[in-house]
Amino acid sequence: MKAKILPLKHQIVFLISTLGICILIVSLNSMQSYSKLQTTTIKNNQELISNQVLQSAERNYEEIKNIASSIAYNQLVQQYLMETDADMKLTSYQHVINFMNNSKTLNKSILDVAILGESQNAANLSGDISIYSSLYNELPDDNLPIYFLDKTTLTIGDNRYTCQIAAMPIYQLSTTTANFIGVLFIAINPSIILGDNLLANSSIPNELLYVNSNQELILGDEKLFDAIQKSQTEKDSFNIVNNGQTYNCQRFHVKTAEGTLYTLVNQSVYSQKIRLMVLRQSILIIITFIIAVILLLTFFKPITQSLEQLTEIMNKISSGKRTALNERIAIDSRKRYCKEVYSIATSFNEMLNETNRLNHDIFDTYTKMYELEMINRKTEIAFLRSQINPHFLYNTLTLICGMASMNESDGVINIAQALSQIYRFSIKGDDIITVRKELEIAKAYIMIQTTRFEDRFTVEYDFTEEVFDALVPKMVIQPLVENAILHGLEKSLKKGHLTLGGRRNPIDNTLVLWVYDTGVGMSSDSLVHIRKLLEDTSVNRSDNIKSNFEQIDFNNQDSLGLCNVNSRISLYYGKLYSLHIDSEENVGTNIQIKIPFNINTASIE
């Protein structure tokens, strides 16, 4: 199996991608482990704090119970509740108030202490005594030593407190029978007695709920308590949902007060905190990875750029783009390079320099050879033109002699001027001219021939406007016109017609010129013979043009002009361009020239 070859850049990208995937897998695994650890830690902390709250509640309620007993069965309190004398009642009242004040300081959760007796004797430290009066007759008849009643709102000074009332029946100590003499009330701040300051100091988002024996909420959020009641679960650890937030709830029984304690942890909040911590770690890892990638790319970039330049230049050279030989691999002295790459780039640049030097030497040699070839080609073209000019002169002088013998001086002058124009045009000026100028010479020639043959034929010109500025070799239309008149129209017994035309073919951007006559035409054998002569005199053949012309019968004027024009076109434009001739006996002949359409002489070599 053939090994797969990858560019260095792709291999670097693959390496970085693999490294990134490995880092991602390790990071995800670490974050997952971290998330599990945090969740486990939070649950353990919740249990620890919940147990601390439970212990604080049990301890405080037990302490409240003991304080209530010490107050209810104090001798001063007993005497005051049973006192009927007004003076003695006032004295005892002050002693009782002082005693209750001292007892209140024994526990921070106590807000108020009050006593109400059967003899209507009453005393309290603060708040509204009527609150206790309404509770006096509502005590349950369960014969319990102390009752922890429902939630009550108590106003003390300018502050309002939501408190729980502890009530203890008071019995006379001096008798053998239990004589009921009054009730002791203690107003308790449930948030202190339950020790919720433990939750306030915790970093975990906790909620605390306390419910008395009557399943009345004493402390906490009522909506959370409603959600707990709706769950209707008997488990001591369960989850509830409130306002889109998920809470983990743990339930504990407070034996001393016969109440129920609920501690709740907002899982949505600490899950969000964990996600935020994970996100921060992810961002840190991504930033670190990006920095590492940037450093890696910065190190490899000069290497890949140099190799890409090397590959690009070599591909251009192999595809034949010679301009690539002038390009070089850029080496910046301010950048760091691998030693091997630097050596390759330097050696390759030196190789291109040496190649350019050799190319210049070869180019100079070929230039000299090309100049020699052009000199030879111009010599051959001059030879062809020398074959054409005597032919023009001979025919025209014959016509002038005939007109002079008939004393047609004006005609002689016109024809002499036309002959002078043609002759001067053929031996002077540029080799490449416009169709407009070439057509002027053809018209001068046609004027001479129409004078000679009078009304033997008519002439029509069919050229588009853009053709007049196109470039053609000098003296290519006139020989074709001459051939059409002398060998087509002149030999015909009927009146003929001569058409000269030109078009640009937009498909291949070529110039098409034609000369069509309605003369005698050619037989099929003569047409084959003419076409063979045109092929033999084309520069496509490897023989010298002069050696080809030596094989032509120059007395046969029917082929000389065509061969000359065909050879000149081939010399100027190459093997793809030559004359094309169609003819039918007793119908006419059409000769067509097809050359590149150009209006810039510099483009024709």
Image: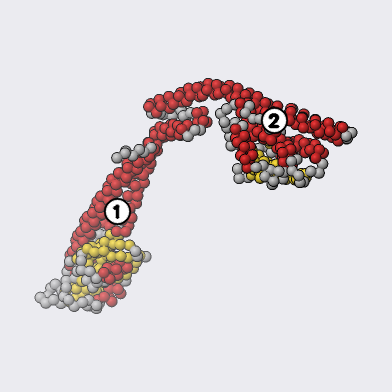
Where the N terminus falls, by quadrant?
top left
| Residue 184 percent location from the top left of the image | 22, 71
Pointer 2 residue: 555
Give SS at disc 1.
loop
* Vertical side of 523 occupied by 36: above or below: below
Give SS at disc 2.
loop
The answer, for residue 380, to whether it is visible in the render is yes
Residue found 47% across the figure and 25% down from its top: 352
Front residue (pair 313, 482)? 482
Q: Residues within 10 Å of mark 1 (few under 14, many from 20)?
A: few
11 sits to left or right of 333: left
Q: State the count of labels.
A: 2
Pointer 1 residue: 203
Front residue (pair 246, 596)? 596
Q: Amino acid at mark 2?
A: Asn
Q: Residue furthest left?
A: 176
459 sits to left or right of 597: right
